[in-house]
Image: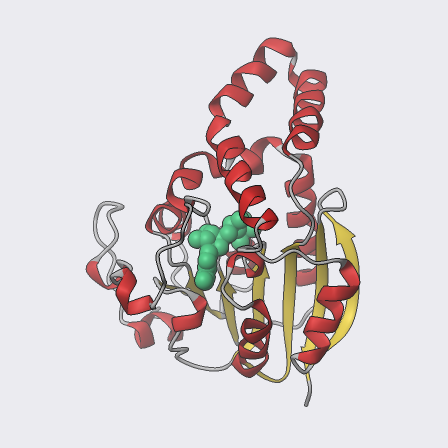
Amino acid sequence: MASRAQSEVDWRLEADWTLPPELQPKADRDFEIAPPSEPLADWSAYAATYDLLLEHNPAYQQLLEEFESFLAGVEAPGVIYDLGGGTGNYAQLAARRFPDSAIYFVEPDLGMSRRAYEKLAGHDNLAFIASPFQALAAPEPADLVICAHALYTMPDPQTRLVEMRKLLRPGGTLFLIDLGRPLDIGDWRSYLFGHLKQTLGIARALQILWRGREIAKQNKAIYQAQRDGRYWTHSSSEIASAVAQAGLEVISQKTVYRGYSDLLVCRAAE
Ligand SMILES: C[S@@+](CC[C@H](N)C(=O)[O-])C[C@H]1O[C@@H](n2cnc3c(N)ncnc32)[C@H](O)[C@@H]1O
């Protein structure tokens, strides 16, 4: 059965996992992204080992559990967007839970999209949109918008929140997780190493950290961008007021990801 999302975006699957032309991101100039003075996070490089987080980072796994409990408590949304969907971990849970919803997976980075495409190709209710959120031509309004650990990387997050509210139908829901505090690389290294050593032993722990060295490198780039203000940092109360200022009502809020991030469930006014 061709889903609504599929037919409207008109994407065609290739036999192999190479992205078909309509899924390829456009040239940077089309997105009006000014070249940064220093490199920001390299999401394609990050993509290669990103899912080690899924396998081995309990704090990341807890976020997905939070998302699953959230999904268990909502009625099937007609239309879902995952903004900055990365390797597709949130979209996969949404697609499994709501096989009849139309899901738009919005991800500008080719490396991330490829991983997501491999993971999600079995779901026929999912359409990929290779665009940054600020350039998105949304095919239809959303009942649910997911934005996990992506808002802080986007230009002008306050404007992006307003756009998320506009993307939602009245009464629609935003599930937002955002990294707010500067990533302390040493703190994360000891947390992960402690966990891996305890569960898998020291040799395996060292092996996994070595395999995940690109994650550490990209987290360092994220930290730099946070420090010099190119990525947004915020306290829990700052993100709550940003969301309220964008015209969204905060239904629930908690601190997650070992105190580094905020999780907010918000509603667009009726
Ligand atoms: C830390 S990853 C989070 C991925 C996924 N949501 C997750 O939590 O596993 C951040 C993602 O945001 C994407 N991103 C960066 N700038 C973006 C923009 N302007 N619009 C949409 N996504 C963006 C990146 O390509 C990357 O995949």
Q: Position of residue 247 (x, y in %)?
A: 67, 83
- Foreground residue, 217 or 254? 217
Q: Position of residue 209 (x, y in %)?
A: 55, 22
Q: Vertically, is 121 above or below 26?
A: above
- Foreground residue, 203 or 79? 203
Residue at the limit of the structure toward the top, as seen here: 203
Query: Which residue is located at x 36 percent, y 65 percent?
Result: 131
**Image quarter hosting the C terminus:** bottom right
**Image quarter hosting the N terminus:** bottom left
Camera sees residue 73: no
147 to the left or right of 84:
right
92 to the left or right of 124:
right
Query: Which residue is located at x 24 percent, y 62 percent?
Result: 12
Q: Position of residue 112 (x, y in %)?
A: 40, 48
* Colour style of the rendered protein structure: secondary structure
Give the total of numbered labels.
Answer: 0
Camera sees residue 76: yes
Q: Vertically, is 216 above or below 25?
A: above
